[in-house]
Amino acid sequence: IFIFCMCWSFGGLLENMDRVKLSQFMYTLTDLLPVMKGDVTLFDFYPDDNVLDWEHWRTRIPEWKYPKDFDPTSLVVNTEDSCRTDFILRLLSSQRLNIIMTGPAASSKSHNLRQFLLTLDGDKYLTTTAVFSQASRPRSLLDTIFSVIDKRQGRTYGPDSGKSCVLAIEDIS
């Protein structure tokens, strides 16, 4: 787990060529890493605590089944990147950490975030999303936040008792 965390802490924002260099460097530090061939790097693996070994992200991709009611506009095919993003979102959110997702345009950040929010238990979490644009004003963010929390007493606000609030802010620029 430490190696995985170190790898993503230092290399999460690196480009592919630099990830290869970091992976090669990590091999000089320990022999507890997965066997990598070709252009495969440490970023292609995750520590599976069920088998106590490294597994390729490919093993987490669910089998795709052709939908009965085919609608090409809502078609979603999971990839290694979407599985990796979901895993890291779940890992960080389980620790109640704030998360910022970065990446180029059209890299499925918003979609992955929405899919993650949909899987949260509604009995434990209240979720809301604020989408920013150049026309956004601070009041619209406050309205979005106040739509899911209540005033308790004095200056104390929060979600319903026993629930946590997850606020997703999209397109900060």
Image (cartoon, rainbow, N blue to C red):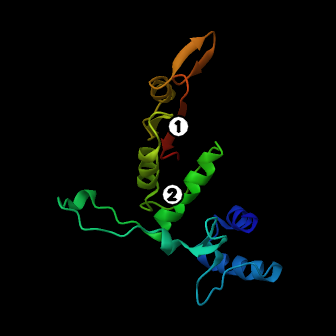
Instruction: Count every numbered label the image shows and give the total.
Output: 2
- As measured in the structure, the alpha-carbon distance from the residue carrying label 2 to the one carrying label 1 is 16 Å
**Camera-nearest residue between 140 and 9:** 9
Specify the quadrant that holds the N terminus.
Answer: bottom right
Residue located at (55% from left, 26% from top): 162
- Going from N to C along the chain, the mark reached first, 2 or 1, is 2
Q: Which residue is mark 1?
A: 166
Residue 99 visible, this orientation = no
The tag on residue 71 is none
Question: Can you tell which quarter of the image residue 42 is in?
Answer: bottom right
Q: Are marks 2 and 1 in contact (CB under 8 Å)?
A: no
Residue located at (43% from left, 59% from top): 108
**Camera-nearest residue between 126 and 22:** 126
Amino acid found under the numbered disc labelled 1:
Val
Residue at the top extreme, as displayed: 154
Residue 21 at x, y percent in the picture = 70, 80
Residue located at (18% from left, 61% from top): 68
Amino acid found under the numbered disc labelled 2:
Asp
Residue 49 at x, y percent in the picture = 64, 64
The tag on residue 86 is 2
Residue 166 visible, this orientation = yes
Q: Is residue 165 above or below residue 63?
A: above
Residue located at (61% from left, 72% from top): 43
**Camera-nearest residue between 54 and 86:** 54
Residue 31 at x, y percent in the picture = 78, 82
SS type, badge 1: strand
Q: Is residue 150 above or below residue 61?
A: above
Left/right placement of residue 140 relative to residue 74 reads: right
Residue 164 at x, y percent in the picture = 55, 32
Question: Can you tell which quarter of the image residue 51 is in?
Answer: bottom right
Residue at the bottom extreme, as displayed: 38
SS type, badge 2: helix
